[in-house]
Amino acid sequence: MQHCAVIHWSLRRCITGLRALLILFIWSAAVLACTRTYRGVPATPVSTSLPAAVPQSTPTPLPIPTATATPTAAPAAQIEKGGHALRNGDWDQALAMYGEVLKSASDPQIQSAALLGAGKAYLAAGKYPEAIQTLGTLISQYPQAREVAWAHFYQAQAYSVSKDDLSAAQKYLDYLTIRPGVIDSYVLGLRADALFAAGDYAGAANDYRAALQAPSLADGTLLEMKVARSVALSGDLPGAIALYDDLYTRTENENTRALIDLRKGQAYTNLGQVQDAYAAYLDAVNNYPTAYESYSALQALVEAGVTVDELNRGIVDYYAGQYGLAAAALDRYLQKSPPDPATALYYYGLILQAQGGYAGAIAQWDKLIQNYPDHRYWDDAWEQKGYTQWAYLDQYAEGVKTLLDFVERAPRHPRAGEFVFDAAAAAERGGDLDQAAKLWERVGVEYPNDTRAQRALFLAGISRYRRQDYQGAFLSFQRALSVADNLNDRAAAMLWSAKSLQGMGQEGEMRATLEQASTVDPTGYYSVRARDLLNGREPFKLPLAYDLAVDSAAEQLKADEWVRTTFNLPADKDLSGLGNLAQDPYLARGAELWELGLYSEARGEFEQLRSSLQQDAENSYRLTNYLDELGLHRQATLAARQVLALAGMNDATSLGAPAYFNHLRFGTHYNDLILPLAQKYGFHPLFLFSVVRQESLFESFVRSSAEAS
């Protein structure tokens, strides 16, 4: 059984959710489970990514229940349960539910819905022949059902991962025939990919062009690159080169330009125009050395015996991870009285650092530092030298000295404040808290306009507090408070000021400061912790009793009334549906993409719609409800925050909004998954809810930034 990825990887990074945990304590009577039926709009999301492998299996006709189902449940309820299991990644349970419906129900609408659900479950489980057959049954037996178009699309997906690309292309076309004008750009792009994989490059080029003409948020540059590539492989090399030339002038992306150079070089080579090919390859090597494709261009030049500037060759090899080749190229360059030795020395140091030759790397950077003070890599050489000393060699004092020597040499350099900050961090890592505190204070005093100044003053206070210099810590925290420009930083400085006062034995002043801190940022960690200290609560003490039940329907009705009153809407204004948003093209595309499992693309369309409604409270509220019930909890939270902002509420005052908003923002979505996991692994449920919120805002198709699994 596979569950939503958002739950699994969140367990691996639980400590990051502590701040959100405290927020959930405020709203521990949080909201309902993740699925409801939106008033007037059905929500039918599916959450999965398709497995890559194609199992060798023989199709088995439905019904085939593979887990215990409830035979007496109403078919519509079984369909809903199947959809819920599908969203949770429990393919076997989903198939059992749908199979039970197919055995017991006679209503064609119920039958077609069950067949579509079963086809999607087979597809998600990697059982592609079964998926194709089940969806085919839906298409043949219920040709008028609304699910038929979607069945064609999912069949196309199954054919595609089965490497039957021509069948996939036909099925995408079948979908477009039934559902034209909704998400044409996206589906045409997928059909073009299938045709390209099948070797029909002319057909692919036509569909890519058509995709460019249809409205969508798809990456136009990528589609244009695909057009040019298809044209080239279809045999029209001059036409492809012209397309590449046009795109090269319109894009500023260096990686795209390097890829264009590589493709042009290949096209010119096939045309026998080798000098033009070499010119394209050289453009990539000389102008875009950090791009991956430039290494392929370099290889083509070297194989052809074309002379390449050794400096650029070394840089390209370095970014490709070819350190031996890079060092050899830079050696050759430095032996010939080169015009830019400083750049070679800088990259030579990076190469040696990557190979573990730290002393040699420092020696290269020292040459640059001593001999080329006006060079663009001069400050980078100082930085790399200091970093190598403290991070790789554990020479903290030497690293600090290097960074401070730079500042002494160039006190007005734009990066001087950054170097002092980094020197303080190195000193702290090395255990010299006194020096760290003094250096962080120096950032705040000497470089007050540096973006790190407030943080530096705060860290100076932390370092002094750790040394039990409570008077010095208090002064640093007060300085940090005086320049704090957001609620979180103000609350943090106040909390630690209070702790410093406590260290000095000033209990009365400590409590007064905690009182202030507790109200500055009510939903933030530091204000919540201040309230804990005032109430004598231990850090992160979990409540023994909590209630996750809530009457969401009643709360939403109260929220409806609050929206009408707050934004002066007519008293009889019905807010239960989408209103005129139902006709919005972004919403139409997003809803269709969501139905078809193209979640990232759907999110993009919905996000564009949300952004367009930043000054529209009524429709932001309608969108909030729709997205939450669809399962896009992250975007729903952002839309809800938009409504509260238009009502003049910030994080501090938004807790006074109707409970519906706060239960939505700090909800207990996916509780049917999280509660059993909490019991199994011995975690408090509120802790796990907070972790998932912190990691993803309950967005089920995201991945951890640390790629945890």
Image (cartoon, rainbow, N blue to C red):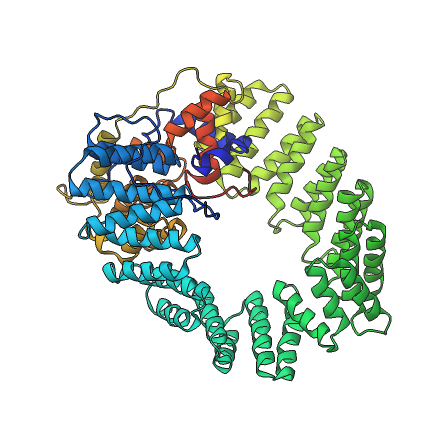
Q: Nearer the viewer, residue 454 or 586?
A: 586
State whether residue 344 is above or below residue 696. Answer: below
State whether residue 371 is above or below residue 572. Answer: below
Q: Nearer the viewer, residue 11 or 21?
A: 11
Q: Residue at x 48, y 48 (%)?
A: 52
Q: Is residue 217 visible?
A: no
Q: Is residue 539 visible?
A: yes
Q: Quadrant of the N terminus?
A: top left
Q: Quadrant of the C terminus?
A: top right
Q: Residue furthest front?
A: 58
Figure quadrant of residue 40? top left
Q: Where is residue 133 shown, x and y percent of the image? A: 31, 48
Figure quadrant of residue 376? bottom right
Q: Indicate left or right for 495 with 382 as reference.
A: left
Q: Where is residue 505 shown, x and y percent of the image? A: 63, 18
Q: Residue at x 42, y 24 (%)?
A: 676
Count of marks placed on residues: 0
State whether residue 9 is above or below residue 680. Answer: below
Figure quadrant of residue 628? top left
Q: Nearer the viewer, residue 544 or 241?
A: 241
Q: Where is residue 112 shown, x and y percent of the image? A: 22, 44
Q: Indicate left or right for 647 with 198 as reference.
A: left
Q: Where is residue 541 shown, x and y percent of the image? A: 50, 19
State whether residue 448 is above or below residue 25. Answer: below
Q: Indicate left or right for 270 with 638 as reference.
A: right
